[in-house]
Each structure stands twice: as structure tokens, then as C-alpha cells.
Image: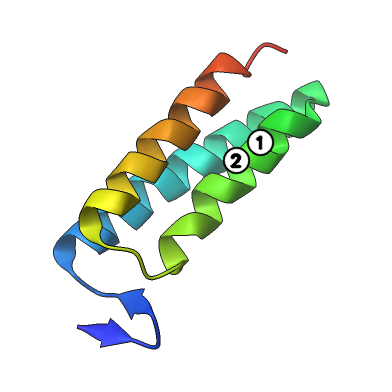
């Protein structure tokens, strides 16, 4: 099902929950450390699933953003 660009497939919902939770974690950790780059990537992880992409694109973008946040977590 697709509602105005937001996909409601099981994969899209699962992707949103997983990467949204990871984004929230990275945002909170970066905010505590004063790391602006980490905060921006955390917000991106929480927001990007709402842009109606296909399932594969959601996972590829999510893994790429997660890897970026993981790399910048101690900057």
C-alpha cells in the first residue's frame, strides 16, 4: 500500500523502525557529545524512510547512513 508517497509494506515499516531507532540513538549520543555531524546523520536516519523509495533503496540508504554515523560516532 502507498499513501501519498509513504510505503506501508512490511519491509518499509521494519526499515523505518530499525533505522529510526538507530538514528535516535546516534542523535542522542551526538547531542551529548556536541557532535553536529553525528546529529545530522541521526536525523537523516530518522527521516529518510518517509520518502517513498523502493524497499532495496531504503535498505541501501539506511546501511550507508548507519555506516557514516558509526564512523563519525567518536568525532
Frontmost residue, 67 versus 26: 67
When the figure is inspected, residue 55 is found, relative to residue 3, above or below; the finding is above
Query: Quarter holding the N terminus?
Result: bottom left
Who's the residue at 42% across and 59% down the image? Answer: 49
Which disc is residue 28 wearing?
A: 1
Who's the residue at 79% across and 32% down the image? Answer: 36
Seen in the image, is 23 located left or right of residue 9? right
Alpha-carbon neighbours of circle 1 within 10 Å: few (<14), some, or many (≥20)?
some
Query: Quarter holding the C terminus?
Result: top right
Seen in the image, is 6 located left or right of residue 44? left
Mark 1 or mark 2: whose residue is earlier in sequence? 1
Q: Which residue is mark 2?
A: 42
Seen in the image, is 35 located left or right of residue 58? right
Contact, CB < 8 Å: mark 1 with mark 2?
A: yes
Q: Position of residue 68 (x, y in %)?
A: 53, 26
Q: Nearer the viewer, mark 1 or mark 2?
A: 2
Amino acid at each position: 500500500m502507498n499513501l501519498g508517497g509513504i510505503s506501508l509494506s512490511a519491509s518499509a515499516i521494519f526499515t523505518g523502525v530499525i533505522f529510526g531507532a538507530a538514528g535516535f540513538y546516534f542523535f542522542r549520543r551526538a547531542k551529548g557529545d556536541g557532535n553536529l555531524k553525528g546529529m545530522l546523520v541521526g536525523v537523516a536516519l530518522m527521516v529518510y524512510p518517509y520518502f517513498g523509495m523502493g524497499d532495496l533503496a531504503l535498505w541501501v540508504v539506511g546501511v550507508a547512513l548507519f555506516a557514516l554515523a558509526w564512523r563519525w560516532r567518536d568525532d
